[in-house]
Amino acid sequence: MHRVDLIVLPLVFLADVLVFSRLLRPDGVTTAERVAIVVYAAAGVALLLFRWRAPVPVFAATVVMAVPPLLVTDYYIPFLVPLIALAAVAQLRSVRVSLWCLAAVAVPVALLVGNAMMHASPSGRVTSGVGSTVFYTAGFALAWTFGWWVGRHERRVAQIEVAHSRAVAQQQEYAEQAVSVERLRIARELHDIVAHAVTIMVLHAAGAQRVVRSDPDRAVDSLALIEDSGQRAMGELRRLLALLRETDDDSRGEAATPGLAQVDQVIAAVRGSGVTATLEVSGEPRRLDASVDLAAYRLIQEALTNVTKHLGAGARVVVSIEWEPEKVTVAVEDDGVGARSPADPTDPAGEPAGSTGGHGLAGLRERVAIAAGDFSAGATDAGGFRVAARLPTSAGPSNPLPRSAATAIRPVGEPSGGADR
């Protein structure tokens, strides 16, 4: 039972027995006839409870129930019950089926018109016939139209909800695929980092073994380096074991793992595309674990690449690196203006401004999380977009970046003799 029936059906019953019957007329109606009217009308209204599950059979039953009273007596005119049943057919069934049911109301309409003409005066039969025909025909037609309109609206809403659910599921699948690809990529890079550390340890262990008697000081230095490399390799392994879920036999590139030391090369490439890029560094650069260094580099690289892709020449972007004793914050912020910038600003990760579920952002967020950092991305008050990450620094000895990367980079067009920012 639908909630609407709690209001509609009582109103239909009251109108049926009070308006379309002689229940309240004092003349010529016995108590038994009044009881019969109430019971018959209640039976028809009760039948409407099943119209949501079987609208066509219920409509047919209401039409059949309308025939006997119209043939036997004029004490009760069953009009509203088949009217509601027809509206349910138009709402829940196809147009073809509902039109056949609409055509079937010709039988009760003919009986209703005949009943009205029979009880009219000889001079008013034509007027009564025409008026009754228009009234009953218009009533059934309006009921069918209303039911058809409600059903069409419900079907359209259902289609939109299904399409939305599919789009959300597809978007989630794409995001999960992007995270999976990013994890495999990180796994390969971390594997190379650890393999490099273990190789260094093996080489220095072999060297220390050869000179342990002839040159103890050199052996001690090798052992210290082995200890330092081992500690760093263990840190990388902890991240790697948390990430790997399946074997990856893909071939790996032989190039060295990049880091913040190569940021100036990325900025130089971006400048070549006409983007005004500036690097701002504050604090004392420190040595980072390889995976942390790589995560910071990838964030800057991908953000700058997408600024070039979506904004193009004329855009201004600031890359900032803020060094703290235990944290390093890297950020890329653009002004949202460029030769290819759309009316709706696009963020550096390739997603619309304000988006929270983009694939680029999902990959960066996953990479930063694996490196035990905090990730943020969002539109700025100036109309641009900012992507940032706060990552842990290494507890090892200081290993400053090259001076070219540790100082501010001059924007395009600034004379080479200009002071560093």
Image (cartoon, grey):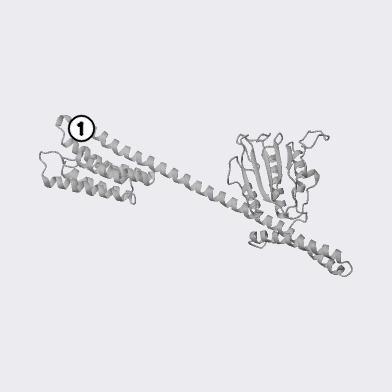
- Label 1 element class: helix
The spot of residue 371 in percent (x, y) is 67, 54
What residue sits 25% from the left and 47% below the top? 45
Position of 13 with respect to 95 (left or right) is: left
Given residues 325 and 203, the one toward you in this image is 325
Q: Is residue 366 visible?
A: yes
What residue sits 60% from the left and 46% below the top? 358
Q: Is 247 drawn above or below residue 352 in the view shown?
A: below
Number of numbered discs: 1
Given residues 92 and 406, the one toward you in this image is 406
The spot of residue 141 in percent (x, y) is 32, 38
What quarter of the picture does the C terminus occupy? top right
The spot of residue 39 in percent (x, y) is 19, 48
- Furthest residue toward bottom: 213
Q: Is residue 107 visible?
A: no
The spot of residue 406 in percent (x, y) is 77, 44
Q: Is 209 drawn above or below residue 170 in the view shown?
A: below
Q: Which residue is mark 1?
A: 128
What amino acid is labelled 1 in the image?
Ser
Q: Is 203 drawn above or below residue 146 in the view shown?
A: below
Given residues 72 and 142, the one toward you in this image is 142
Given residues 129 and 55, the one toward you in this image is 55
For label 1, the crowd category at 10 Å Cα-Cα, with few meaning under 14, some 14 to 19 and many 20 or more, is: many
What residue sits 21% from the left and 33% below the top? 129
